[in-house]
């Protein structure tokens, strides 16, 4: 089982990262993979009741990789953490299968109470660089979180969200597919861009009306 986990995770890196040219390169040079491997050790100690040992192993993983994963977090299969520096995954976070996370992502809590306080991320989700997903919310399957988005509410399956706070945008292709950094490349899909274009249209219409009124005056 451990060998199968390692093989399929390495393959996931090879399929999604064009910079990964060999299995050996992934094994030796990808801190995201190292962080997940260390997390498996930390979580095993945590679940066996060796809480301090689990936290210490997790702490060493952070020191070695720059990626902080609490041993209480639950990670799915084929998780890819690309670049990875600054990623923080909280204690009660749950991550599904085939999730892709970029650097500086935080899956954080918004409460000091015990119990569930971190996000649950569904299968095949992409979370772009710098995104903050906060609270005991659910990110649905095949969702896309744009770079630097701040997500504080549920995200339905198949939805792309961008901005602060994150808001949904339309995707032309509803079929699950890989979108680097989880961010739409078409600026017309950006809700802020859309609002600016609406304002620009209103200003143009007002200018036209004033021009016509000025020409009509004697």
Image (cartoon, grey):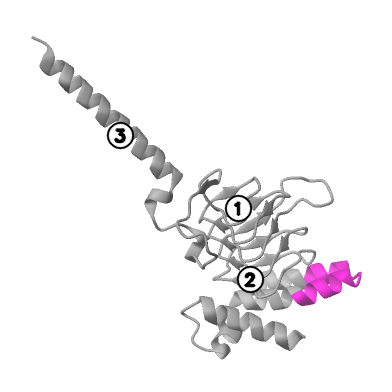
Picture coordinates of residue 51, whole percent (x, y):
87, 67
Q: As rendered, which of 63 and 154 lies closer to the eye?
A: 154
Q: Secondary structure at mark 3?
A: helix
Residues marked 2 and 1 touching at CB (< 8 Å):
no
Residue 201, labelled with which disc?
Answer: 3
Residue 62 percent location from the top left of the image: 68, 69
Q: CA distance from mark 1 to mark 3?
A: 33 Å
N-terminal of the two: label 2 or label 3? 2
Q: Nearer the viewer, residue 52 or 171?
A: 171
Q: Say whether marks 1 and 3 touch (CB < 8 Å).
A: no
> Which residue bears the numbered disc 1?
132
Q: Quadrant of the rendered structure where residue 107 is?
A: bottom right
Q: Quick check: 141 above or below 192?
A: below
**Residue farthest to the right?**
49
Mark 1 or 3: in front is 3
Task: Name the mark nearer the viewer: 2 or 1.
Answer: 2
Q: Using the image as rendered, state which of residue 178 and residue 88 is in the foreground.
A: 178
- The disc, 2 or 1, on the residue closer to the chain's N-terminal end is 2
Whole-angstrom CA distance, mark 2 to mark 1, is 19 Å
What residue do we see at 29% from left, 29% from top?
203
Stretch of the chain drawn in magenta: 40-56
Which element is circle 2 on? loop
Residue that badge 2 annotates: 98
Label 1 residue SS: strand
Q: Position of residue 148 (x, y in %)?
A: 52, 53
35 displayed left or right of 85? right
Classify mark 3: residues with Cα within 10 Å, few (<14), some (14-19) or many (20+): few
The vertical placement of 198 against 130, above or below, is above
């Amino acid at each position: 089982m451990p060998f199968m986990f390692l093989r399929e995770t390495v393959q996931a890196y090879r399929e999604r990262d064009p910079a990964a040219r060999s299995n050996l390169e992934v094994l030796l040079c990808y801190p995201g993979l190292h962080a997940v491997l260390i997390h498996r050790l930390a979580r095993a100690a945590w679940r066996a009741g060796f809480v301090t040992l689990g936290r210490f192993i997790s702490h060493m993983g952070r020191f070695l990789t720059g990626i902080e994963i609490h041993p209480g977090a639950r990670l799915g299969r084929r998780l890819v953490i690309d670049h990875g520096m600054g990623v923080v995954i909280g204690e009660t976070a749950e991550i599904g299968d085939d999730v892709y996370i970029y650097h500086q992502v935080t899956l954080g809590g918004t409460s000091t109470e015990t119990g569930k306080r971190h996000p649950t991320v569904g299968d095949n989700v992409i979370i772009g660089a710098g995104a903050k997903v906060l609270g005991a919310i659910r990110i649905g399957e095949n969702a896309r979180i744009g770079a630097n988005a701040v997500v504080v509410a549920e995200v339905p399956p198949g939805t792309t969200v961008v901005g602060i706070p994150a808001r949904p945008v339309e995707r032309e292709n509803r079929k699950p597919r890989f979108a680097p950094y989880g961010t739409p490349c078409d600026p017309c899909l950006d809700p802020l861009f859309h609002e600016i274009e609406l304002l620009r249209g209103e200003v143009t219409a007002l200018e036209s009306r004033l021009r016509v009124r000025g020409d009509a005056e004697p």
